Structures are given as structure tokens and as C-alpha cells.
Image: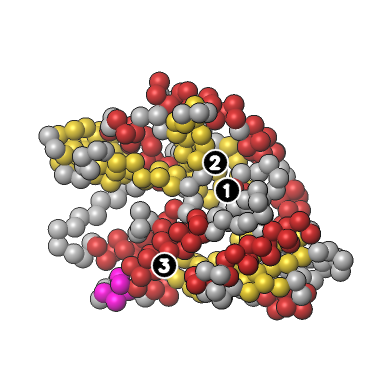
Amino acid sequence: NYTPDSKDGSIDIKKAVTINTQFEVSKQFWAYLSDREGFGSPKDFLNVVPHLSFVRGEKNIDYLKRRFEALKKHHAFEDIVYSEDRATMQEWMPLMMPGRPADEPIAATRALNGTDVNFGQLTRQMLDYLATKPGVKMSYLQKVTGLERNGKGWRVEVKNTQDGSSREIDAGFVFLGAGGAALPLLQMSGIEEGQGYGGFPVSGQWLRCDNPEIVNQHQAKVYSLAAVGAPPMSVPHLDTRVVDGKKSLLFGPYAGFTTKFLKYGSPLDLPMSIRPGNLKPMLAVARDNMDLTRYLIKEVRQSMADRLETLRGFYPQLKAEDWRLEVAGQRVQIIKKDPKKGGVLQFGTELVSAQDGSIAALLGASPGASVTVSI
């Protein structure tokens, strides 16, 4: 996704460099927090996990080699290693090599300084830390039901979802960082800069393995290439994940269409977000993205056997009983106006703010949480 292949055969690494730089800033911020008394240990949310790219077929090998050569020239990626040697890849990916055809063309790159971040745990540690500071109040199980201008600031109406009580808060600045719910809140604000934005929700599913005999054979995040016609968000990867000190393997993502903007949202989220200002961009996106539509239909219709067959391309000797399906959260991809096409589907994140700087909303999905410090 972040290193596209140009028509002249060159690899554009600008986006990869930008995101890498932003992630380094995030790590510096987390290191700063970890030095503060009461924040907790970074080991609870951050683990070192090598990042690999793995491809099959001569065409994909050619791309990966050119990508490696382009990245290697930049100081941020100078430690990346490339190999087509099966013995080397056996050391890097011992779970993935057995059972693979001897004549199958394969190649991989590896960066040892990769990470696995448990953003749920990081968020809990940040909120617990902030709650101890003067002037900070944390409120949970709250829902914003009103958002309107109040002089130079904003009046926010908030409902307690437990007892039904409501209250109003006057704020000089409001940040809408509510994931999939950020778009409806942006629309609620009515700011001109938010006109024309829409959202395309996609659900995420993963195959998960907790069997220690399997998990302990894989210590990496291994990415491949998206299938022809599939969107960038569909790039498959087999990951080591550490949650509460326990290792698991996750493979995916498998996408599905939903009209909810949040995992536990309403089926009316998408239809209720349609406005006169974003109807044209949304129709244009529907017209111009038939490949995405076909991809989502195919994903929705997949059986467990179909999903396991995709995983078999990474792990040829898998056993079905070791894997189960996990439903993850939602991605609400950005739909925005475009002067030529009428509307485009944007993969990534975007910050939308009022001209006076009194309110800002973070829209979109990947790379998401890993770069929010810079955003």
C-alpha cells in the first residue's frame, strides 16, 4: 500500500517514509509517558516483533526486490534484508515453509525492529494516568447527543447511557476522535469544512490460533500482497500478537459489508449519514468502485473452509481445528468530493477542522492509531 509500483518501474517510498517517521514520533511519545510515575510499563503494550514481506510468483518477486532496493537506500530502512533462499526463510518463518512446493518461486524481506502494539492496553494506561492529574475528569458510558456553536466555542450535550441523565459542557475546543462515530459527530457540528464527507463502513474478521505448539513457531508479522481487484485494506498478513502477556496468531483481514459505523452501532448509521452535500460523492464512489463491491460480496459469501484456504497460502500444513473466527471492529473509509470524478473513496486518515480551529475530527482508518501523535 505504502510503496506503489510506478509505470516507469520505480518504487515510490515517500508514503512509507512519512508513516515510518510518524510512528517513530509515536514511540518517542510513549517512551516519554513510560518515564512518568504511575503510567505503567511499556512492556504491557509494546513488544518487538520482526516485520516481513512475503511473496509468491516471479512477478511479485520482481516487485519485492525492487521495493527492497528502494527502501534499503533510505536510512530508516537500511537494516532491511532480502532473501530468496529457502533455508534463510525457514529461519525467518519456520511455520510457513514446511509443505510448500519445492519449485514454488518465493521471496521475503525482513526488518528486525518491527513492533506489536496493544492499543487497547495503551489506551487504558493513558486514561488511568490522566485520571490522576488535576483538572482532568474521565467520563465513561457517555453519548454525545448535541453539538452546537456557543460563541467562540462549543456547547456539547452529553447523555449518561446508564441512568439516562443529560448534561451540557461548554468547551473552547472539541476534538472528535470517536472512530467510526467521528463522521456523524462532524455532521452534527454543521461546520462548512465537513460538508461533502461520507463514510463507507467495512467490517473486519480474523482467524485466530491460541495453540502454543503452533503459536511458538511464528514470531513475526508477515505481510503479502492484496489479490488483483481487492482494495488496499485487504492485504493479508499472519501476525504474532501479544495480549495480556499471552501470544496468539491472527490471520486476515477478511472484510464484510455492514451499514454500522461502530461494532456495536446501529444498522441505520450509514443511511442516516447521507446528506444532500455527500450524496453525489457517494453515488460516484458506488459507480467507480465495482471491483470493491464484487470483492465485498465475495468476502461476505466465504465459508470457513474458504478462509482457511486463503490462510493455507501462508501456512500450508494448517489444521482447521486450531483456528477460529474472530469479529473485529469497523473501518469507516472516507468518501470525499473530487472535482473530476465527483467523489472518491480514500484509504487512510484525514483531519478535518474548522477554519477558526475550535473543532477538529479525525476520519478514516489505517494507519490510524499508530500515527495519531503526529496527526
Query: For residue 187, what is the image quadrant?
Result: top left
Q: Secondary structure at mark 3?
A: helix
Earlier sequence position, callout 1 versus callout 3: 3
Q: For marks 3 and 2, give the one nearer the viewer.
A: 3
Q: Secondary structure at mark 1?
A: helix
Between the C-alphas of marks 1 and 3, the distance is: 22 Å
Q: Which residue is mark 3?
A: 24
Residue contact at pointers 2 and 1, CB within 8 angstroms: yes
Q: Residue at 45% x, 34% y: name it.
A: 336
Q: Position of residue 144 (x, y in %)?
A: 28, 38
Between the C-alphas of marks 3 and 2, the distance is: 28 Å
* Type of amino acid under label 2: Val
Q: Which residue is mark 2?
A: 202
Residue range in magenta is 32-36
Q: Secondary structure at mark 2?
A: strand
Q: Nearer the viewer, residue 240 or 244?
A: 240
Q: Residue at 24% x, 34% y: name it.
A: 147
Residue 233 badge: 1
Residue contact at pointers 1 and 3, CB within 8 angstroms: no
* Type of amino acid under label 1: Met
* Type of amino acid under label 3: Glu
Q: For marks 2 and 1, give the one nearer the viewer.
A: 1
